[in-house]
Amino acid sequence: MKVYTRKNAAVGYLTLKAMQRAMDSKRRKRRSGFRVAAYVGLGLVSAGLLAAVLALALRRKHGDVEEIVVVEDEIVGEVVTTPEPVPAT
């Protein structure tokens, strides 16, 4: 029984050529312009969302500080009224 036959040689040759083509196509593979534009757009949208969330967080933090200052300036528990006139008798 022969190990080296025409059929085995053809299968081996075709397998090697297919592997070589696959490796070459991976090396030369370029991204299409549409795909690059989609990635850039997705990056810009992500950065915009991150900036918006950060701005909201800072605004809320800044707003809480102002409320605390207003509460500290108020007089709590005292009623401030004008003095009543003294009746003349």
Image: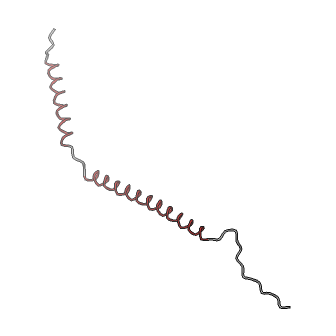
The residue depicted at 58 percent of the width and 69 percent of the height is 70
The residue depicted at 74 percent of the width and 82 percent of the height is 83
The residue depicted at 62 percent of the width and 71 percent of the height is 74
Image vertical order of residue 58 relative to residue 6, above or below: below
The residue depicted at 47 percent of the width and 59 percent of the height is 57
Question: Residue 68, image x and y in percent?
Answer: 57, 65
71 or 62, nearer to the observer: 71
4 or 37, nearer to the observer: 37
Direction from residue 32 to residue 67 in the image, left or right: right
Quadrant hosting residue 14:
top left
How are the colours assigned in the image?
A: secondary structure
Direction from residue 52 to residue 30 in the image, left or right: left
Direction from residue 72 to residue 19 in the image, left or right: left
Image vertical order of residue 69 relative to residue 21, above or below: below
Question: Residue 86, image x and y in percent?
Answer: 80, 87
* Quarter occupied by the C terminus: bottom right
Image vertical order of residue 47 relative to residue 66, above or below: above
* Quarter occupied by the N terminus: top left
Toward the front, the furthest residue is 89
Toward the bottom, the furthest residue is 88
Question: Residue 54, image x and y in percent?
Answer: 43, 59
| Number of residue marks | 0
Toward the right, the furthest residue is 89
Direction from residue 70 to residue 2 in the image, left or right: left
